[in-house]
Amino acid sequence: MSTTLALILLAAAVAMIVALGIYAFKLRQEVKRREAFRIDEDRRAHQNSLENLDYVVSALVQEQVDITEGSWRCKVLLEIVDPSLAERPEFQAFAEVYNRTRHLKTHSARKQLTPRERMQEDKERLAVEDEMRSAVLAAAQQVINWRSKGGVGLH
C-alpha cells in the first residue's frame, strides 16, 4: 500500500470519526432537550392537579358540588399529586365515599337504567352522602389547611 493511499484512508477515517462525534453530540443535545420538556410537562401537570384540587375542595366546603362527585375528584387528584396522599388518615373520607359508591352507574350507563333502578341508586348515593358529609367536609378543610401550609406532595 502506498503512503498516499494510507494518508487518504487515514483522513477518511478521521473525517468519519469527527462526523460520528458531531452526530452523537447532536443526539445527546436532543435527548437533553426532550428530558427538560418532559420534566416541565410533569411540573405543569402537577401544578394543574394542585390547582384543580384547590377548586374542588373549595367547592366542597362551600357545598357547591355533591359530596360524591367532590370526593371522587379529590381522591383522584390526590393520587395524581402523590399516591400516598390519598392514604393519609385526614383525607381517607374521600376514598371511603369512592369505595362505597364506585359501583353506581354514571353518564351513559346511568341513562340506560330504568327509572326505578335510577331511583334506587340515587337513594343509595344520598344515604352515603348523608352519612359521610361531615367527614368529607372535614377532609376538604384538611386539604385546604395542608395546601395553605405549602403542601405540594411528591415526597
Image (cartoon, rainbow, N blue to C red):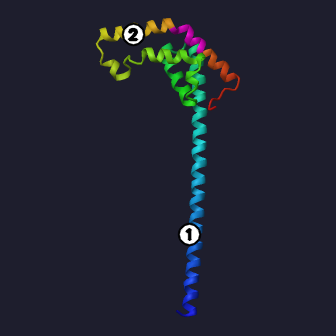
Q: Where does label 2 land, which residue?
A: 122
Residue stretch rendered in magenta on the structure: 132-139
Report the residue at 54% width, 90% height from top. 5
**Place of residue 134 in the rendered image (x, y in percent of width and height, measured from the top left):** 56, 8
**Secondary-structure class at tag 2:** helix
The amino acid pointed to by label 1 is: Leu
Left or right position of 14 against 98 = right
**Place of residue 136 in the rendered image (x, y in percent of width and height, measured from the top left):** 55, 13
- Magenta residue check for 26: no
Q: Where does label 1 land, which residue?
A: 20
Direction right: furthest residue: 149
Mark 2 vs mark 1: which is more N-terminal? 1
Examine the rendered structure and indicate whether residue 44 appears above or below residue 145.
below
**Place of residue 82 in the rendered image (x, y in percent of width and height, measured from the top left):** 58, 30
Examine the rendered structure and indicate whether residue 29 appears above or below residue 37.
below
Quadrant for residue 146, please give it: top right
Examine the rendered structure and indicate whether residue 113 appears above or below residue 84.
above
